Image (spheres, rainbow, N blue to C red):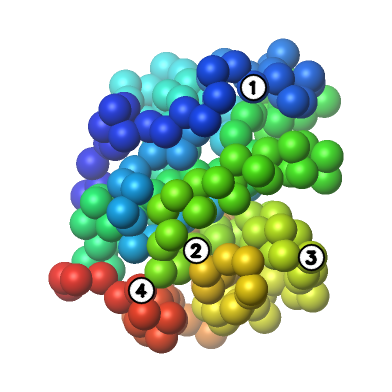
């Protein structure tokens, strides 16, 4: 079972970023990256969700100020990597966009960040990748994958075809697209796996780019 990250491992990159006025007005906290600066893997999501403010600890990055700390998606991706043998010291979690993008419908659910919001936050993401210099960047879901590839002027043809297929670029470490933890059960069968088969395939893909964990 994954443990909740130490708040001291949070890596703020600006005291009060206001590059995106709409996001700054709606957020509770900026969801900065969290983890080791010597991590083997950097795990990238798209943006923090609305979260669960009444939860005991896993309230989500919009409330904790730390990426991938939601009780559903955060715990699930951390548990999956723990099951592959990764110690928390081998991992760094962040988002392509650091603030919760609220839906226009109710303001309590999240929408997809705009291209401008992704561009405004991209210097933070690239600075994190430069600071950590991981063996691999794990992109969770289509939107995170597209945001990372946009940093290298690349585009994504089809996401499912890209899952577990490492992408080599000149600017970034190898990027490994994986299914978003919140939708894993929906998409795993469409890839022809059961959950354990997908886990083993993920291990093989990470080992192929030299990012295998030190334990099992």
Residue shown at the point (41%, 53%) measured from the top left: 132
Residue 115 lies, with reference to residue 181, above or below; the image says above
Identify the residue shown where x is 33% and y is 56%. Answer: 39
Which disc, if any, is residue 48?
none
Determine the CA span between mark 1 and mark 3.
25 Å
The residue under the point 67% across, 80% down is 161
Q: Judge whether residue 7 can be spotted in this image.
A: yes
Give the mark nearest the N terminus, 1 or 3.
1
Q: Which residue is mark 1?
A: 17
Quadrant of residue 135 in the image?
A: bottom left
Q: CA distance from mark 2 to mark 4?
A: 9 Å
Q: Nearer the viewer, residue 11 or 165?
A: 11
- The residue that disc 2 covers is 137
Mark closest to the chain's N terminus, 1 or 2: 1
Circle nearer the N terminus (4, 3): 3
> Percent x, y for residue 2?
25, 47
Image location of residue 62, percent across then percent down: 53, 25
Rendered image quadrant of residue 28: top right
Q: Is residue 199 visible?
A: no
């Amino acid at each position: 079972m994954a443990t909740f990250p130490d708040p001291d491992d949070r890596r703020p990159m600006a005291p009060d970023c206001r590059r995106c006025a709409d996001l700054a007005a709606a957020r509770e906290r900026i969801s900065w990256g969290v983890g080791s600066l010597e991590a083997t893997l950097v795990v990238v999501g798209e943006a923090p969700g609305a979260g669960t403010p009444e939860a005991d600890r896993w309230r989500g990055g919009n409330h904790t100020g730390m990426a991938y700390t939601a009780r559903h998606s955060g715990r699930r991706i951390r548990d999956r990597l723990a099951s592959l043998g990764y110690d928390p010291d081998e991992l760094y979690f962040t988002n392509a966009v650091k603030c919760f993008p609220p839906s226009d419908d109710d303001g309590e659910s999240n929408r997809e960040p705009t291209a401008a919001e992704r561009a405004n936050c991209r210097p933070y993401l690239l600075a994190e990748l430069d600071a950590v210099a991981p063996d691999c960047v794990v992109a969770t879901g289509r939107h995170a994958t597209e945001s990372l590839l946009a940093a290298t002027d690349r585009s994504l043809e089809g996401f499912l075809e890209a899952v577990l297929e490492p992408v080599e670029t000149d600017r970034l470490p190898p990027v490994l697209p994986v299914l978003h933890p919140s939708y894993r059960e929906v998409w795993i069968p469409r890839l022809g796996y059961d959950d354990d088969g997908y886990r083993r395939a993920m291990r093989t893909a990470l080992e192929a780019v030299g990012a295998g964990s030190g334990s099992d």
